[in-house]
Image (cartoon, grey):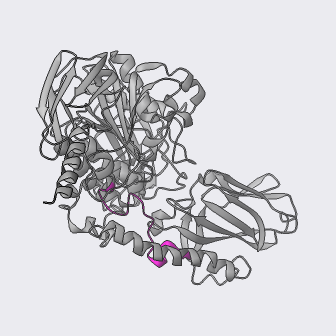
Amino acid sequence: MSKKHSLIFCYLFFLLSVLKAEIRLPAIFSENMVLQRDVPIKIWGWTDNNEEIEVHFINQVKKVKANKRGEWSLQLDPMSYGGPYLMHIKGRDSNITLKNILIGEVWLASGQSNMEWTVKDVKDAPTEIRKADYPQIRAFNVEKALSPEPKSDLNGMWQSCSPATVGNFSAVAYFFARKLYVELDIPVGIINSSWGGTDIETWTSSSAFNVLPEHFKERYGDFRTRNLEEFTKENEKKKTAYYQALNKETGTIEKWETLPVDLSSWKMMRVPQLWEEVLGEVDGVIWFKYNIKLSKEVIKKQASIHLGTIDDADITWLNGVQIGATNGHAINRDYVIPENTLKEGINTVTVRITDNYGGGGFYGNADNMYLEIDGNAYPLNGEWYYKESVTNKQFGFTYISPNVQPSLLFNAMINPIIPFPIKGVIWYQGENNAIRAYDYCTLFPTMINDWRAKWGYEFPFYWVQLANFMAKDEKPQESTWAELREAQSRTLALPKTGQAVITDIGDADDIHPRNKQDVGMRLALITLNKDYGKKEIVYTGPVFKSMQIEGNKAIIYYKNAANGLLLHNKYGYVEGFTIAGADKQFEWAKAYVDGNTIVVYSDKVSNPTAVRYSWSDNPDVNLFNKEGLPAVPFKTDDWKWITEK
């Protein structure tokens, strides 16, 4: 080695020797955090290789030496609840001090948009925010991220609950935590890791998903095993072609709104409902038509058209005349019809719907779809003609979202916090999986068991059953949402599970009901009873036990009706029951309370074999227990599901 090279080497060695080895902690360890009480606490991080780390917390001092990769971890002994405390992490050249740490109960809150929904957007939000002075409730919001491989860290920070911070807390998680804190007087920490519009598959690890039967993987094609970066590049080309087609959209060029139109190539779809229920995951432009016959006497009178809510944008014509256009999924479409637009005989309503992402189409309440003439309503819900104009599916384009491959959110938003001890999980998800509800019977318990295996212990896992949503059924029919609720109920076969039923507090017109207070409270009732010794607390409404057939009547027995059944109907009728014979044709049933049972029958079914309750997207619910919790939806039959493939 030359003298010059020797000097350079010595200089570099000197620089490296004086550089400080910085200690780095995962983001989950920060000021204001809550640590789980009464269990060993793992602390971990990164530093220089072979450096000795020392952690001081309360009366404990723990030491460990980092490995050759600079990774280190140690374990604190179990501690009872309390605080606030300081934690000092010391290395050779640097140290970290974390302030305002509490020891209490830590719950992981996860799922899709209804778990993500924030306090600032709930009903009575200003009042809730003003009252939110709970410094012993803390929340950690995991920042959104995707990863094809398991990550070791994520982004986010712990915040103490106050009127200044609570607005961005998960509303369900906050009201859950508030109920626990008020009842227990123990600090509560919530880790909110949720993302709207996500499938359960993306929250499941690849090690668990990959051992499922092959049909679970078919919907991903080769996306599941492809390099995400390579796929993204190819997808961009398809995206360009798709957007070019949108700019030259077929229906607009060919003037599908004009009359007459040859409908022989158009298909039929019941509306209102999200078109994903029929077409699968499709975005783009789809046209709809509906014919309504009017008499000569009404066509000259003042008229308007009402189409409810549409996702995302519409242009609406009547008899080829444009009468309105709106952009926004939560806006009711109410359009005045110009004079001389209506005609005697067949009148054609044409709606061009553009959906940018997620659910698409008419999705509101059926009662909000009508033609109004001189104060009289003519229903517009029912079977409409539809035709796809330009959709992403036609071009093979897929939005890069958490759902493009399984495990993307598990890798980025769950895996990094697995070493962090938690009391349990609260979960609100399933809307996205409703069109594959039968598979959810497998996917949901698979994910729960997967998470428990990764953490290394069988923690409590409680979830929210799907709310009531969309149009009321005019006659009994199959329902993907009802099947998803059934899949959730079947998952109660797993130990240490529970579900909050909310079919009475949803919103027909909004997939995001604003009453998150009762949702969080009902979740809290479960854990207060099951995990915190408050056995006097009732946490579920009436649960189906058995059915007995007596002539043309079905007698329904419940597991937990000892305190009696409560009916919210002054005439004594129980709503929401259907009944069928061996022909599997369900009819609306008459039902009434008889002691602690429900008697169900229909004049149209002489030999009943099956009964269903709350079996629809938006069921009628007026059966509760004395504590005001709704009866749990159920089916007595084992007939094939519409989502079974």
From this view, report whether residue 502 is shown above or below residue 645. above
Q: Which range of residues does the magenta coloring cover?
A: 389-408
Point out residue 326 in the picture as x, y percentages from the top left corner: 69, 59
Point out residue 607 in the picture as x, y percentages from the top left corner: 34, 54
Instruction: State whether the magenta stretch is mostly helix, strand or loop.
Output: loop
Tell me what residue is drawn at x 43 percent, y 34 percent: 172
Tell me what residue is drawn at x 48 percent, y 36 percent: 622
Tell me what residue is drawn at x 76 percent, y 58 percent: 335
Using the rendered image of the protein, determine whether residue 388 is visible from the camera's viewpoint. Answer: no
Q: Is residue 277 left or right of residue 155?
A: right
Tell me what residue is drawn at x 35 percent, y 41 percent: 427
Q: How many marks?
A: 0
Is residue 501 found inside the magenta-colored segment of the image?
Answer: no
Query: Which image quarter is the N terminus in?
Result: bottom left
Point out residue 563 in the picture as x, y percentages from the top left corner: 34, 23
State which quadrant residue 55 falls in: top left
For the residue pair 303 and 525, the one nearer the viewer reads as: 525
State which quadrant residue 443 falls in: bottom left
Q: Is residue 296 left or right of residue 66?
A: right
State which quadrant residue 314 falls in: bottom right
